Image (spheres, rainbow, N blue to C red):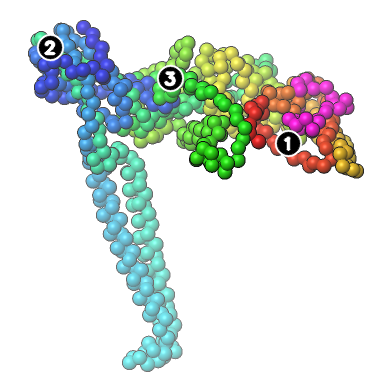
Amino acid sequence: MMSRFAAALILAPGLASAAEVDLASRIDRVTVYPDGAVVTRLGRAELLAGSSQLVLRGLPATIDPASIRVEARGDGSFAIGAVDVRLVPGDARAGLDQTIEAKLKALREEKAGLEGQIAAIEAKRGTIETFAKTGPDRLGPDGKALPVADWPAVFDAIGTALVKVQAELRGVRVRVEDVAAEIAALERARPQQGRQGAPKRDVTIAVDAQKPVAAEFTVSYRVSGAGWTPQYEARLTTAGQDGKPELAFIRRAELRQRSGEAWNDVALSLSTTRSAGGTRAPDLPPLQVLFFEPPALYETRRGAAAPAPMAAARAKAEAEMEAAKSQRQADSRPAEVQMAAIEAGPYQAGFTVPGRVSVPEDGTSKTVILSETRPVPTLGARIAPELEQRAYLEAGFVPGEDVPLLPGEVLLHRDGSYIGRGRVGLVAPGDRVELGFGADDRLKVTRAPLRRRESEAGWIGQTRTDLREFRTVVKSLHAQPVKITVTERIPFSENSAIAVELLPATTPPAEKQVADKRGVLAWTFDLAPAAEKEIRLSYRIKWPGDRELTYEAQDQPVPVPLPMPR
């Protein structure tokens, strides 16, 4: 018989005064989300006839009480009443390894003794140094001068004593460093313990059976302090079988947890669902446009000034982006590698790690391989000669899975050599990915200005102009044709008084606005072996002679602005 209950059920009549019985359980499986995890425990209990309270003790305080779910099955009929959660003081001594603790105690005592020896040796050295400062004229009997013939013996004695003391001091200090290293290693190895009095949570389950029943319970709950982040690896072979390029694209997940309990020998799965995020789109409030009023006048009429709606929204968005950036900052080496199976759903993707996995609670990272595909890459080269006169090899491909790629870092390898790190954004299934694989030294790039002509205003109201022209030459040293994309830019203006025009001397571009970036042009062509291609860029800017220009680089496409107060 199966019964399913939520944590918010009301206690059934007759179960309030039931005796408490501990429910022994173990963690059987864990589903990890990018921002949390759901832990599932299995437990068995022999229910006596009548009412009783099963208690699942010592759960971490990070669990969400509203997420607790209980399922039960038995060889006879029984009923479950309320499922309650209560806070209890934690035991800071729980989970300590007494062998490690005894070793730590002995090492700390040894360290204290060695530090005492260092203090005594340093005092001895100080005495010898003080003695050495006494002149030979006072070292003889009754404070008289010491015979000159005895001076070398005194000097040798002082030097020998100092050398001996220094060697003794160095040996003790080395031992102190060794002991300190052992202590640090043992402290890292011992189980993590909570602070004294750190709370835990107990879950109580009210049950009522007509007769004795052997029952199995499944208890699941969500915990914070756990999550996973995507990682990728791309291995490019520029000349594989039959001379064609080959690519291995590996999807990984790095997970870590500090939930307050160790996940030992559990069935592990990962999900792309954010369990703690919003559940619906935000409500968009109305936006009113008003005439701008000076702050002093505004305060006189209405009291304290309120921030503009767009400014408040912008500040909130920037705060959220900063918080997300801080959360993403994590960099550690993988501890383990395992393969996983993909389960794609209509709204999320899941990955099941085969076998049983252990994840410690100290935040140590564990990495598992989620998938590996071998898409067919298309090679090319990309050049931005204004910034760097060098070509970079690029590989474009479609991952070939029904699972989106979440934003993450990509480890890049080319022909067996690690060349660096890249990043991918959110990639929907079927979308194309472009990754850079380092400089292409078989493409020679030169860029030079051909002319620049500026006209100065001679009288008020005259128009000023600035004409610029550049030439870029790309020469191939490859033995096969290469597809090349060259990107250049010209300034753009949102002010009608500033006019920017592309002149006829410009080589016609294939794209006049690359990736919605205004003013960014692109030329794409196939370059034959030993051939070269010339690209010319010529433009002119016109503006009123009584004004000066300034240039600002835009990192993102500039949206069409809303009318704002001036």
Residue 123 falls in which quadrant of the image?
Answer: bottom left
Left-right relation of 82 to 530: left
Residue 464 falls in which quadrant of the image?
Answer: top right
- SS under mark 2: strand
Please name whichever residue, 306 or 125, is drawn nearer the observer in this view of the structure. 306
- The percent coordinates of residue 38 (x first, y second) are 35, 22
Closer mark to the observer between disc 1 and disc 2: 2
The amino acid marked with disc number 1 is Leu
- Which residue appears at 82% of the width and 42% of the height? 546
Q: Quadrant of the C terminus?
A: top right
- Which residue appears at 32% of the width and 60% of the height? 115
**Residue 46 visible in rendering:** no
Left-right relation of 67 to 45: right
Tell me which numbered mark, 1 or 2, is placed earlier along the sequence: 2
- The residue wearing badge 2 is 209
The amino acid marked with disc number 2 is Ala
Dot 2, crowdedness within 10 Å: few (<14), some or many (≥20)? some
Dot 3, crowdedness within 10 Å: few (<14), some or many (≥20)? few
Closer mark to the observer between disc 3 and disc 1: 3
Residue 193 falls in which quadrant of the image?
Answer: top left
The amino acid marked with disc number 3 is Thr
Tell me which numbered mark, 2 or 3, is placed earlier along the sequence: 2
- The percent coordinates of residue 550 (x first, y second) are 75, 40
Dot 1, crowdedness within 10 Å: few (<14), some or many (≥20)? few
Per the rendered image, the range of residues in magenta is 486-512
- SS under mark 1: loop
- The residue wearing badge 1 is 387
Q: How many discs mark residues in the rendered view? A: 3
- SS under mark 3: loop
- Which residue appears at 81% of the width and 31% of the height? 499
